[in-house]
Image (tube, grey):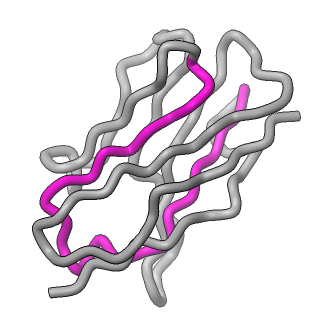
Amino acid sequence: QVQLVESGGGSVQAGGSLRLSCAAFGYIPHTLCMAWFRQGPGEEREMIATIYTDSSSIPMIVDSVKDRFTISLNNAKTTMFLQMNSLKPEDTAMYYCAAGINGCAAYWGQGTQVTVSS
């Protein structure tokens, strides 16, 4: 069982930056997929970035944010980050971290709200 705790959300003006963190607790296998999802108002939840703890795959970031967002892990591979720069109002959403062994969404954090004002 993996527990995930997000932090780092908040309110910023357009053009600002935020860094989200997702700390993993419990039994963390050597190979774990970790991912960031977001769900905007009235929208479906979408995966925006993935990374593997064993570096078995290149980190993935969706085209819509790849020029502005960066996904990374700490050295211990227990905390995932999402660095978000040049934020836009359309980035306003609840951001969730998720993880899994087969797939990236077996375990979920509670979510952290990001609000970007124009």
Taking the image as shown, residue 5 lies to the left or right of residue 35, namely right
Q: Residue furthest right?
A: 1
The count of marks equals: 0
Task: Please say if 105 is above or below 8.
Answer: above
Based on the picture, tell me whether residue 42 belongs to the magenta stretch: no
Q: Residue at x 36, y 78 (%)?
A: 115
Residue 54 location, quadrant: top right
Q: Which residues are magenta?
A: 77-101
Task: Please say if 82 is above or below 8.
Answer: above
Task: Please say if 22 is above or below 103.
Answer: below
Residue 92 location, quadrant: bottom left
Q: Nearer the viewer, residue 26 or 38?
A: 26
Measured as percent of width and height from the top left, residue 109 is found at: 69, 54
Taking the image as shown, residue 84 lies to the left or right of residue 58, namely left
Position of the N terminus, as image quadrant, is: top right
Q: Residue at x 14, y 75 (%)?
A: 14
Q: Nearer the viewer, residue 103 or 115?
A: 115
Taking the image as shown, residue 14 lies to the left or right of residue 83, namely left
Measured as percent of width and height from the top left, residue 59 is found at: 37, 27
Based on the picture, tell me whether residue 94 belongs to the magenta stretch: yes
Position of the C terminus, as image quadrant, is: bottom left
Measured as percent of width and height from the top left, residue 56 is found at: 49, 10
Q: Residue at x 46, y 81 (%)?
A: 43
Q: Nearer the viewer, residue 25 or 89?
A: 25
Measured as percent of width and height from the top left, residue 105 is found at: 67, 45
